[in-house]
Amino acid sequence: MKNKNPLLIVLGEPNSIFSELIFKAYKRKIIQKFNRPIILIGSENLLKLQMKSLKYSIKIKKINSFNFKRLNLNKKNINIFNVEFKFKKTFDKISNSSNKYIDDCFNIAIKLLREKSAFGLINGPVSKTHFLEKKYLGITEYLARKTKIKNKPTMLIYNSIFSVCPITTHLPINRVTKVLSKTKIVNDVININSFYKKKLNKKPKFAILGLNPHCESIDKISEEKRIIKPAVKLLIEKKINIKGPFSADTFFSKKNISHYDIVIGMYHDQVLTPMKAIFGFNAINLTLGLPFLRVSPDHGTNNQMLGKNKSNAQSLISSINFYRKIK
């Protein structure tokens, strides 16, 4: 297949369930039916050994050139751009030994995306403890630093029916009020609104949650009055369809969420817990505000399930299928 820029998949933490999910996506012909080539970025040797261990049989083709348009990529194969990685075991415990390898994979992907040689990016999960090493709250912030963007990027947990955005991401709860700001709320809502209009051809409806129980506080001035309501007022002035703040404890009923496309929450678990309870694995993680679109399955490395061949591939499949609908 020529003349279409490929979708890149960075394999991420080598000791995760992600290779298993890749094999399952091939078995279900999700990758073969995608409308452009897909190229993995990671260790060819490790992928072969993991495939053998998990008892899959898919031909792997090593890609030796960045000039993808001249390559005749067969979608029946797993096409992989090899990144060298010295590993001891086919499946091992997560450690810092894979940090440079993961960083090398991301560097290659970012280079290709900057050069407009690739269409988009999906990445496998990484360890926040080891790879991010407390330097970054998550991959959202890691990629922001890598791409040197001025404004903070936006994390969106997306489902075609309903999506959520935490204003603060993987942050300890006792630090949320210190970083919560009107500027960040406005930035994230504008990023999401622009994405929906430009990529999904839709003008979205937003709901925003309060921080405190019942949007009330025993303090003299609450975060709702000081930060959230002024942000909502400014966004309405910018012709964005947003309402709230709503109390988080009663918001996530079927009746309420049927009226909105996105809910903006103040911290991670405030919106991700109900999102995962409602949609399970059928949601994906988007990073908006980068020079390119980044998508990842909405789950972690799940190291304890390595080699068991029992993991659910739905979030990876949703990540791949998502790229079918965007412009």
Image (spheres, helix red, strand yellow):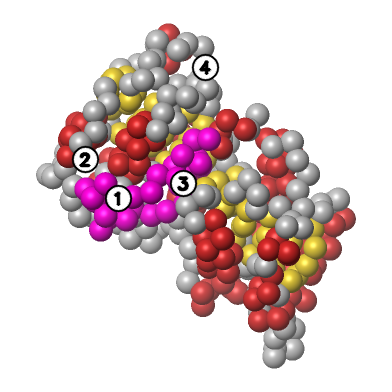
Marks 1 and 3 in Cβ contact (< 8 Å): no
Q: Position of residue 37 (x, y in %)?
A: 45, 21
Residue designated by label 2: 54
Q: Position of residue 254 (x, y in %)?
A: 68, 63
| Label 3 Cα crowd, 10 Å radius (few <14 / some 14-19 / many 20+) | many
Measuring 53% from the left and 50% from the top, which residue is drawn there? 283
Residue type at mark 3: give it. Ser
> If you read the primary sequence from the N terminus, does the residue marked by circle 4 or circle 3 appear first?
4
Q: Camera-side residue: 200 or 314? A: 314
Residue designated by label 4: 4
Number of numbered labels in the structure image: 4
Label 2, secondary structure: give it. helix
> If you read the primary sequence from the N terminus, does the residue marked by circle 1 or circle 3 appear first?
1
> If you read the primary sequence from the N terminus, does the residue marked by circle 2 or circle 3 appear first?
2
Residue designated by label 3: 315
Question: Which labelled disc corresponds to residue 310?
Answer: 1
Residue type at mark 2: give it. Leu
